[in-house]
Amino acid sequence: MLHVVLASFLSGVFAVPLFHEGTTFLLYENFFWLQGWFGLPDGFRPLSSGFSMRLMPPVGLPELLNLMFWGGMWGLALGTFQRLVRPPALLTGFLFGSLLCTAVGFAPGYGERGLPFWVAGYAPNWLRTALINGAWGWGAAALMQAAAINRRFLH
C-alpha cells in the first residue's frame, strides 16, 4: 500500500512541471499562433510562461514548489480514486484535473471576493485553467499507469 501512496504522490508532483507548467509554457509562447488558427479570445492566454519561482506567502516557498506539493496531494486523491473505482485512467485523469481541480481552485477565490461562481466574462479563464489542470491530470494518470498503481498487489 505504501507503494501506491508514494507512487500517487510522486506522480502528482512530477506531473506539475512536466504537464501543468509545460502546457502553460506552450500556451503562453504559442498563443498568437494558436489564436490565429483557432480564434482564441485574448483571455485564454496565461498570464505568465509558468515555472514561476516567485515566493509564496506565508512560508516563502517558490510558487513552482508550492504547485508541486499540491499536485502531489491531488495525485493522492486521483490515485485513490483510480485504485478503488478502476475507470479508464487517462480520460479520468484529464476529467479529474479539468473539472474537479479547476472547480475547487476557483470556488474559494470567488466566494471570498463576493463574486458569483460562474461569470460569462471569465469563461476564457475557466477554459484555460481547465485545459492546464486537465493536462496535469492526464499526465499524473499516465505516470501512475507507468507505476502500476491500479493493479492489486497480493503482498
Image (cartoon, grey):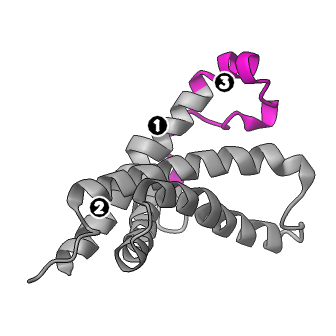
Q: Which residue is mark 1?
A: 22
Residue extending farthest to the left is 155
Numbered marks: total: 3
User: Does 53 appear in magenta?
Assistant: yes
Quadrant housing the C terminus: bottom left
Distance of mark 3 from mark 1, alpha carbons?
14 Å
Q: Nearer the viewer, residue 55 or 138?
A: 138
User: Does 43 appear in magenta?
Assistant: yes
* Left or right position of 4 against 49: left
Where 24 falls versus 119 (above or below)?
A: above
Q: Earlier in the sequence, mark 3 or mark 1?
A: 1
Q: Whole-percent x and y of residue 71? A: 44, 61
Q: Nearer the viewer, residue 114 or 41?
A: 41
Q: Earlier in the sequence, mark 2 or mark 3?
A: 2
Q: Which residue is mark 3?
A: 31
Quadrant housing the N terminus: bottom left
Neighbour class for label 1 at 10 Å: few (<14), some, many (≥20)?
some
Q: Which residue is mark 2?
A: 10
Where 133 falls versus 52 (above or below)?
A: below
Distance of mark 1 from mark 2, alpha carbons?
17 Å
Q: Nearer the viewer, residue 97 or 18?
A: 97
Q: Secondary structure at mark 3?
A: helix
Neighbour class for label 3 at 10 Å: few (<14), some, many (≥20)?
some
Q: Which residues are magenta?
A: 29-55
Q: Quadrant of residue 28?
A: top right
Q: Whole-percent x and y of residue 79? A: 37, 70
The kind of residue on which mark 1 rests is Gly
The kind of residue on which mark 3 rests is Phe
Neighbour class for label 2 at 10 Å: few (<14), some, many (≥20)?
many
- The residue lying at 73 percent from left, 70 percent from top is 107
Q: Secondary structure at mark 1?
A: helix
Q: Whole-percent x and y of residue 94? A: 52, 54
